[in-house]
Image (spheres, helix red, strand yellow):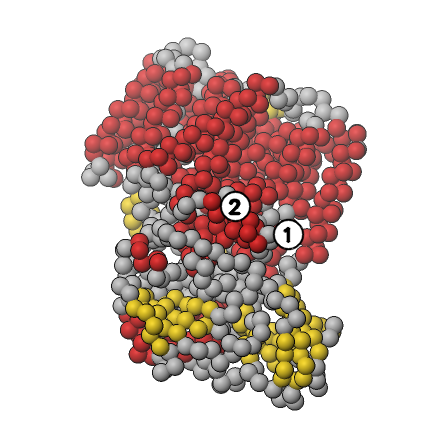
């Protein structure tokens, strides 16, 4: 496939259409892309990363400004090794609010998704007109909007690169340029930071390569797999640290299915109904979801019924592959609920929608019935009536909108059946019915939380530097108030980062096992009701309280039971300095506040200076003298795999203390010397070697002329004779 000037223009047009459609959503609802995890996890961290790059000229891989969520590289989802994501983060500090920043990121990625969807459809073999239809259907997909673009954002960003990666992987045998593009787009997909998308691309590559090799049986048939492998190898640095984090993390593994966020198979067959609610086991129980998250596009059933399946004789490998792949994705939506680090099978729904839409449009455009069939229309009308009645039966409290949906589908089916659809009407129906589905469901998915974290005064400190002390917010119930102004006084998740607060709270789907066990029952960094008591507990070995060892000088307790409980449990050292409608703020003087860097204990028995300012990844302490009773040092840092220590150039052990502190054991009879505590990206040498090997292999394949003799014809499969 050679891209013509017209093709390139169409891709740019598709990009701007996606940009426009997503921007119109923002015009109707300014906070449309700012819910749940975007409020508590992603936008605060994205903003802080962008601020760090612009103002402090460093890309943070680790920060001590959050005990729970500070392992940025280990979390994988922040995409810090994705150059496009890093570039977009640079604009966030110039946005007046996090919701504006979320809208900016979503709109740009919708543009990337729209252009990539159009390109993928063209690569599969869908004609230009119907490729624009596919683009419109995918760009207005409800599941992408309600779950990914507004909450699980890394899944959305990875999908926007995925459509490009699969398109270029299919084309990778045709030219060296496409081969390189496949490697780059695979790298961008992997580094965007979501495991489901990596699994999806890997499965497609396996299916496509096996089918191609079965027909061709040449080494060149393995080029698509090589492109995916080389791109993934170059991206190892982005996800291998996650493997290290899992070793000390709290993330559950195993394989099981309890039905949580597993969609009913029956609901998936309502892919052509713009109004179909559902019931599913979600966070707050077995609840109704009124948004049509199972809607793919109105033309699903018309295409199935009006395609002349008997005329399908020969299909290219890419079409056979994507057809099998669509069926496989349908199966994946049914579970298991958790497979190792892969969670929530409901997340496979938009992948199923994307590839099903493109597959069906291919068959319709190449094998549509030649003559008008009244019987086929009657069947189609019967399907519309039947599915509409089923929706009414399940959700009788929504009669008006469901009946209108049926009427619209019937009218669209009539135009489809009697060939009254010109391109303009195709586009109008696809976009118009999608808008109808969106408006009927509203702009907020009630299953995902709207915390109301509309923080007014954004401020982020240098994530790379070590804070002198910390704060912790005791908030066991974040809905103790529904007033968004409460987040000027309290916080959870990563919200503290945009308050300029170095805190214990954070957001981590993986977590740090010991820290989570003691303080945080949820990934959002909300605290146990007894978290204050845990922090006030005095450690038997050091004689300091846990809060003192953590260098927590300030406790902010949410109004109500959290504030009352801490006020009753605290010692007289803690003084109430501020009380507002939403929180009580307590502070006390740290016994170790004069110690340099993040050193927390022991308090005496040595002399020490700090020759240079400590950072999250490197801390140097110069000991002038060390007493005979000083053997172990404790640092106010979260223990992660990747820390190393040297004393006078000799490696010494770094171990966890109490499960989540950094502890360093000094050499026996140490009198004086230099201690260097550093954090290294886990598996960095392996990652560098893999990246080097990827580049070298790419070069060797590019100069190997024999494998680039593409005949211009893709092998085909004979479906029926």
Q: Decide: few, some or many residues near mark 2? Use Cα within 10 Å; few <14, some 14-19, many ≥20.
A: many
Q: Decide: few, some or many residues near mark 1? Use Cα within 10 Å; few <14, some 14-19, many ≥20.
A: many
Would you say residue 503 is visible in this rendering?
A: yes
In the image, which disc is placed on residue 86?
none
Q: Which of labels 1 and 2 is toward the front?
A: 2
In the picture of the structure, the residue carrying the numbered disc 1 is 237
Instruction: Kindly identify the residue that appears in the image at 33 percent across and 20 percent down.
Output: 412
Q: Is residue 104 left or right of residue 598?
A: left
Q: Quadrant of residue 556?
A: bottom left
Instruction: Kindly identify the residue that appears in the image at 38 percent across and 15 percent down.
Output: 421
Nearer-the-camera pick, 47 or 218: 47
- Element type where label 1 sits in the image: helix
In the image, which disc is placed on residue 89?
2
Q: Quadrant of the C terminus?
A: top right
- Horizontal and vertical percent position of residue 538: 45, 82
Q: Which residue in the rendered view is the most extreme toward the top?
A: 371
Instruction: Kindly identify the residue that appears in the image at 47 percent across and 41 percent down.
Output: 105
- Horizontal and vertical percent position of residue 50: 52, 49
Instruction: Kindly identify the residue that appears in the image at 64 percent across and 52 percent down.
Output: 237
């Amino acid at each position: 496939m050679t891209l013509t000037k017209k093709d390139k223009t169409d891709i740019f047009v598709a990009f701007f259409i996606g940009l426009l459609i997503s921007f119109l959503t923002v015009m109707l609802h300014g906070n449309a892309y700012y819910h749940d995890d975007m409020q508590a996890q992603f936008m605060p961290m994205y903003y802080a990363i962008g601020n760090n790059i612009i103002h402090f000229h460093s890309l943070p891989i680790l920060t001590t400004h959050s005990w729970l969520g500070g392992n940025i590289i280990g979390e994988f989802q922040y995409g810090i090794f994705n150059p496009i994501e890093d570039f977009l983060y640079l604009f966030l500090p110039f946005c007046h609010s996090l919701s504006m920043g979320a809208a900016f990121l979503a709109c740009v990625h919708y543009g990337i998704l729209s252009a990539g969807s159009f390109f993928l459809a063209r690569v599969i073999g869908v004609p230009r007109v119907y490729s624009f239809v596919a683009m419109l259907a995918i760009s207005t997909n409800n599941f992408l909007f309600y779950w990914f673009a507004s909450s699980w954002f890394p899944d959305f960003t990875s999908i926007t690169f995925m459509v490009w990666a699969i398109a270029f992987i299919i084309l990778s045998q045709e030219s060296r340029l496409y081969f390189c593009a496949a490697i780059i787009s695979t790298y961008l997909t992997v580094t965007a930071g979501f495991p489901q998308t990596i699994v999806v691309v890997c499965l497609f590559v396996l299916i496509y390569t096996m089918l191609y090799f079965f027909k061709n049986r040449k080494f060149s048939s393995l080029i698509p797999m090589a492109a995916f492998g080389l791109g993934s190898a170059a991206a190892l640095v982005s996800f291998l640290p996650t493997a290290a984090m899992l070793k000390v993390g709290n993330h559950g593994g195993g394989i099981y299915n309890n039905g949580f966020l597993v969609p009913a198979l029956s609901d998936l067959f309502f892919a052509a109904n713009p109004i179909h609610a559902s019931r599913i086991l979600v966070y707050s129980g077995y609840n109704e979801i009124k948004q049509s998250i199972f809607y793919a596009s109105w033309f699903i059933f018309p295409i199935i019924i009006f395609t002349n399946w008997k005329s399908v004789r020969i299909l290219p490998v890419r079409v056979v592959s994507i057809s099998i792949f669509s069926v496989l994705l349908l199966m994946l939506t049914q579970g298991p609920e958790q497979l190792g680090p892969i969670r929530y099978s409901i997340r496979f729904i938009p992948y199923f929608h994307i590839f099903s839409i493109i597959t069906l449009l291919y068959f319709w455009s190449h094998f549509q019935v030649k003559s008008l069939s009244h019987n086929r229309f009657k069947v189609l009308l019967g399907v519309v009536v039947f599915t509409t009645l089923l929706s009414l039966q399940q959700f009788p409290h929504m009669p008006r909108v469901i009946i209108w949906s049926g009427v619209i589908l019937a009218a669209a089916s009539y135009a489809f059946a009697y060939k009254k659809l010109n391109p303009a009407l195709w586009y109008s129906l696809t976009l118009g019915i999608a808008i109808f589905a969106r408006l009927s469901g509203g702009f907020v998915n009630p299953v995902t939380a709207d915390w109301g974290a509309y923080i007014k005064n954004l401020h982020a400190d240098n994530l790379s530097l070590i804070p002198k002390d910390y704060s912790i917010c005791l908030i066991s119930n974040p809905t103790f108030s529904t007033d968004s102004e409460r987040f000027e006084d309290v916080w959870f998740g990563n919200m503290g980062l945009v308050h300029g607060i170095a805190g214990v709270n954070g957001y981590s789907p993986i977590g740090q096992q010991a820290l989570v066990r003691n303080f945080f029952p949820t990934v959002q960094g909300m605290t146990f009701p007894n978290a204050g008591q845990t922090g006030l507990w005095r450690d038997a070995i050091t004689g300091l309280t846990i809060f003192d060892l953590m260098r927590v000088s300030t406790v902010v307790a949410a109004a109500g039971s959290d504030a009352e409980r801490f006020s009753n449990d605290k010692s007289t050292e803690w003084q109430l300095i501020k009380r507002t409608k939403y929180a009580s703020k307590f502070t006390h003087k740290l016994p170790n506040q004069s110690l340099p860097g993040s050193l927390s204990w022991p308090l005496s028995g040595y002399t020490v200076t700090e020759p240079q300012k400590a950072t999250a990844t490197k801390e140097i302490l110069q000991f002038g003298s060390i007493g005979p009773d000083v053997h172990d040092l404790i640092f106010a840092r979260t223990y992660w795999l990747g820390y190393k220590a040297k004393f006078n150039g000799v490696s010494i052990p770094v171990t966890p203390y109490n499960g989540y502190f950094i502890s360093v054991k000094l050499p026996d009879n140490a009198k004086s010397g230099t201690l260097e505590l550093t954090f290294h990206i886990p598996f960095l040498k392996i990652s560098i070697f893999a990246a080097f090997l990827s580049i070298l292999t790419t070069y060797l394949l590019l100069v190997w002329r024999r494998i680039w003799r593409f005949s211009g014809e893709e092998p085909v499969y004979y479906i029926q004779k």
